[in-house]
Structures are given as C-alpha cells and as structure tokens.
Image (cartoon, helix red, strand yellow):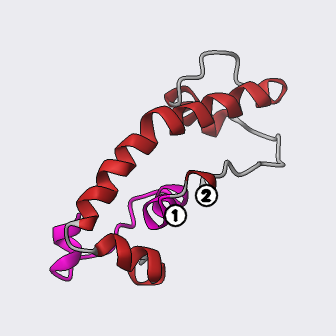
Amino acid sequence: MAVSLAQGGPPPVFLREWCFQYLCSGDHDSIRVNSCHSTDDMSEFTDEIVGCGYTGKVSVDMKSNIIRAIVLHSTMRVVPMLEQLRKGLQLYDLQKVMHCKPGFCVN
C-alpha cells in the first residue's frame, strides 16, 4: 500500500473509517464503536458481529455483550495488524502525511 501511494496510486478507500483514523493517529482512544439507535433489523450485521467472535444470540437485548465482543476483537486482533501496516507506511513517511493531512489519502 505504501509503495502504491508513493507512486501516485489510489488512496486506501478499502478501509473502514475507524481503521483509517487509527492509521492516521496511532491512538487507541480514537477507536469508537458507533452506536446504532435503530433496532429494526440487526440481521444485516450478523456476519460482522459473528466475525468479531460473538457467539451468542444476536438481538437488541444482547447489545452490551455484542459491543464488548467487537471492542475485544478490534483491540486484540485488528489493532496489531494495523500497527504493522503503520510501520510499513513509515518506510515512505506516508504515515506522517496521513496524520498531518488525512484528506489527501481519502478518495
């Protein structure tokens, strides 16, 4: 990814917003789980919830358990991977560009 950006390639538009913000800042506190106020249909999020390691019933009643599973997944699995990606971006000083001018790296 760093080589692609350094050679004028496209920005990393394949990342979720919170992943991109973490790459820009490196700050664990910048990771936020957005709250969803609608309880109409959680079935569209079932794959993502299960992908985070949650194994219980997916329902509004289990919201706090689902959020804990998502936070645990992001801090134990995803953040270390993103940290490796940040180190790769530092090879071309692209992490500094993303931190100072994040708008340049967003499509």
Amino acid type assigned to the residue bearing label 2 in the image: Ser
Q: Is residue 16 visible?
A: yes
User: What's the residue at 78%, 30% (across, down)?
Assistant: 64
Quarter the N terminus occupies: bottom left
x and y percentages locating residue 7 in the rendered image? 15, 80
> Is 75 situated above or below 87?
above
Quarter the C terminus occupies: bottom left
Q: Quadrant of residue 101?
A: bottom left
Reply yes or no: does residue 2 show up in magenta.
Answer: yes
Reply yes or no: does residue 8 show up in magenta.
Answer: yes
Q: Which residue is mark 2?
A: 30
x and y percentages locating residue 73 in the rendered image? 53, 32
- Disc 2 secondary structure class: helix
- Disc 1 secondary structure class: helix
User: What's the residue at 30%, 49% (across, down)?
Assistant: 84
* Left or right of 8 in this view: 106: right
